[in-house]
Image (cartoon, grey):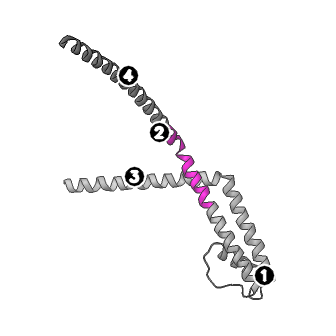
């Protein structure tokens, strides 16, 4: 009977953790969707894909339609690289190389935005911890000053007792 209870408890804990993870993911998604900067980044990525895709269509003989150019630009920028539609001309490949670098920049910015969101969500908890540490540190400094003052008084008393002891033996 105890074994079944343990399994049920473990299963409930696992379900609770899954629910917490889903809730956390939904909150993060909501925060990311509210971010104007993320919207601007996505808009820039879409615009770059459209512009470079159309340029590839006009420049490269292997790109047969504007949609093929846009597809090739998107696949290149996201670093998927299916290889089904690729530029073959020098200018097309040069443009694709530039798009690869732009894709790296976009993904770096995306990662930075998500990191800022994650850190920003926990800043209140961090602020509370910092305040607690400051209070503890000031408390320690106050205690340290008291200990040093007491040691100084004890040192003075020891010197006075030493002098008194020497004067009594003479």
Which residue is labeled 2 in the image? 129
Q: Mark 4 points at which residue?
A: 149
Question: In the rendered image, which quarter is residue 102 located in?
Answer: bottom right
Mark in the foreground, 1 or 4: 4
Is 47 or 139 nearer to us in this picture? 139
* Label 3, residues with CA under 10 Å away: few <14, some 14-19, many ≥20: few
Of pointers 4 and 2, the one earlier in the residue sequence: 2
Q: Is mark 4 on a helix, strand or loop?
A: helix
Cα separation between marks 1 and 4: 82 Å
Give the Cα separation between the discs numbered 2 and 1.
56 Å
Q: How crowded is mark 1: few (under 14 residues within 10 Å), some or many (20 or more)?
A: many
Q: In this view, does 80 lie above or below 137?
A: below
- Counting the numbered discs, the total is 4
Callout 4 touching callout 2 (CB < 8 Å): no
Sequence-first tag of 3 and 4: 3
Q: Do the residues labelled 3 and 2 touch (CB within 8 Å)?
A: no
What residue does disc 3 label? 16
Segment colored magenta: 110-128
Q: Distance between the residues labelled 3 and 1?
A: 52 Å
Residue ID at (66%, 66%): 105
**Residue 57, disc:** 1
Would residue 146 be visible to someone looking at this image? yes
Which label's residue is closer to the chain start, 2 or 1?
1
Q: Quick one: quadrant of the N terminus?
A: bottom left
Report how far apart the C-alphas of labels 3 and 4 lie in the structure.
54 Å
Given contact means CB atoms under 8 Å apart, are the residues at marks 2 and 1 in contact? no
Relative placement, left or right, of 30 versus 154 is right
Residue in the picture at 23% in, 12% down:
167
Mark 3 vs mark 1: in front: 1
Residue density around tag 2, few if under 14, some if 14–19, many if 20 or more, within 10 Å:
few
The quarter of the image holding the C terminus is: top left
- Relative to 10, does residue 88 appear above or below in the rendering? below
């Amino acid at each position: 009977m105890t074994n079944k209870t343990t399994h049920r408890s473990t299963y409930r804990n696992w379900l609770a953790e899954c629910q917490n993870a889903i809730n956390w993911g939904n909150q993060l998604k909501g925060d990311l969707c509210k971010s104007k900067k993320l919207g601007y980044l996505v808009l820039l990525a879409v615009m770059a894909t459209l512009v470079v895709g159309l340029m590839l269509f006009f420049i490269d003989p292997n790109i047969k339609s504007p949609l093929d150019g846009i597809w090739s630009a998107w696949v290149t920028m996201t670093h998927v690289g299916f290889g089904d539609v690729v530029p073959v001309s020098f200018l097309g490949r040069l443009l694709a190389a530039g798009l690869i670098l732009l894709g790296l920049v976009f993904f770096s910015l995306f990662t930075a935005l998500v990191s800022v969101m994650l850190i920003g969500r926990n800043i209140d908890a961090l602020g509370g911890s910092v305040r607690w540490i400051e209070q503890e540190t000031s408390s320690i400094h106050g205690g340290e000053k008291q200990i040093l003052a007491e040691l100084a008084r004890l040192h003075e008393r020891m010197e006075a007792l030493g002098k008194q002891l020497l004067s009594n033996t003479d």
